[in-house]
Amino acid sequence: MRSELAVREAKSSEYDLVADLTMSAYKPLFEGLDLPDDLGWYGAELRDVKGRASKAIIVVAEVDGRIVGSLAYHDDYAEETREGNPENCAGFRVLATDPAYQGRGIGESLTQWCIDRARTDGRDALILNTTDYMEAAQRLYRRLGFKPYPEIGYHIGGSQPVEVLGFRLELRD
């Protein structure tokens, strides 16, 4: 029996499920690092789906009625960038796939939803930030045509420094 995948906007009643899913997807990325079990301030940000929903659309991927992926789609990503001035660009953040469903096209389906929405809305590009250690995500973005966009990249210092990378997909020829 073939499973059906659907991508849709989340209901506010699903935000707790999305928060749990996001933590389960991101937590393995930090194994072996000297971080608290709840990932500290970053974990709090990952769990804050309601906060993201105040300025973005929370989008979920469902397989047979079960939420297995999510992200936050921003119609105007300029408010999410620290550097650069990406005018008329949509973007997304916090792409997460349930670890049991990784490698099955969930992230690609969610990203494609964003590409389609940004095109429909007449945006010039779809942009995003990811980190240097999220290699699977980088491979997905490159395969879908995203190019490095260092204008919105930045560095997070501290005991566990992180390089935040920018990517951009042009939507107009």
Image (spheres, rainbow, N blue to C red):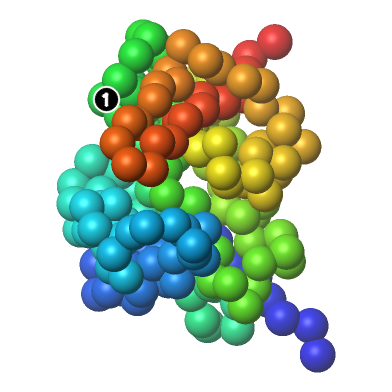
| Relative height, residue 81 to residue 144 (above, below) | above
Residue drawn at 45 percent across, 31 percent down = 164
Quadrant (top left, top right, bottom left, bottom right) of the N terminus? bottom right
Q: How far from the left and from the top, in percent, is residue 44?
A: 22, 58
Q: How far from the left and from the top, in percent, is residue 5?
A: 64, 70
- Going by the numbered disc 1, the residue's amino acid type is Glu
Residue drawn at 67 percent across, 49 percent down = 136
Q: Secondary structure at mark 1?
A: helix
Is residue 70 something that shows in the picture? no
Residue placed under numbered mark 1 in the picture: 79
What is the crowding at mark 1: few (fewer than 14 residues within 10 Å), some, or many (at least 20)?
Answer: few
Q: How far from the left and from the top, in percent, is residue 6?
A: 59, 67
Residue drawn at 77 percent across, 37 percent down = 143
For residue 140, which quarter of the picture? top right
For residue 158, which quarter of the picture? top left
Q: Is residue 128 left or right of residue 39?
A: right
